[in-house]
Image (cartoon, grey):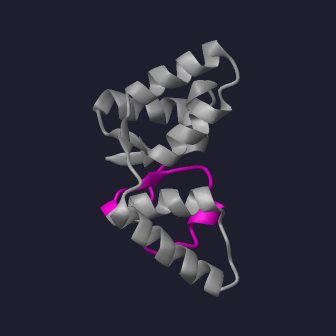
Amino acid sequence: MIVADSDVLIDALHGREPGASRVAEGLEAGVLGTTAISAFELLSGARSPEQREVVATLLAALAILPFDEKAGEAAALLRQELEGQGQTIGMADYLIAGICVSRSTPLLTRNRRHFQRIPALLFADL
């Protein structure tokens, strides 16, 4: 499985490349999922009933990985490590990274600037 970050899913929703093609390929191959955190970000960003319907349709096609105890432990350690080095990446990104690291699942994102600070995190090519 490959975990798509919110930014790539938003690109797909707007037809922006390369995200749109990459998401379509992942869905067709049955290997694309996302996190409960990204699902929250997408749903909370939908401003109209039409947007909510489009987002809900996309999310229904994806496996949604939960933020569970193992992900919480991983996210907490990642946050402690980075903040101990004087770096931060934002709470949502810690949670997303924790989900991916705890499952050894690669992340598909445009936001590598933040996520590259996490050595244990795997990446999928965009």
Is 104 in front, or is 78?
78
Give the percent coordinates (x, y) of residue 45: 67, 33
Residue 107 visible in the picture: yes
Furthest toward the top, the residue is: 50
Residue in view at x 32 percent, y 60 percent:
103
Residue 122 visible in the picture: no
Q: Main secondary structure of the magenta part?
A: loop
Give the percent coordinates (x, y) of residue 115: 57, 64
Residue in view at x 50 percent, y 56 percent:
96
Residue 126 in the image: above or below residue 61: below
Furthest toward the bottom, the residue is: 84
Q: Quadrant of residue 60?
A: top left
Residue in view at x 51 percent, y 38 percent:
39
Give the percent coordinates (x, y) of residue 117: 58, 73
Furthest toward the front, the residue is: 69
Is 47 in front, or is 126?
47
Q: Is residue 109 magenta?
A: yes
94 sits left or right of 60 in the view: right
* Range shown magenta: 103-125
Give the percent coordinates (x, y) of residue 61: 37, 26
Q: Is residue 118 magenta?
A: yes
Residue 18 in the image: above or below residue 53: below
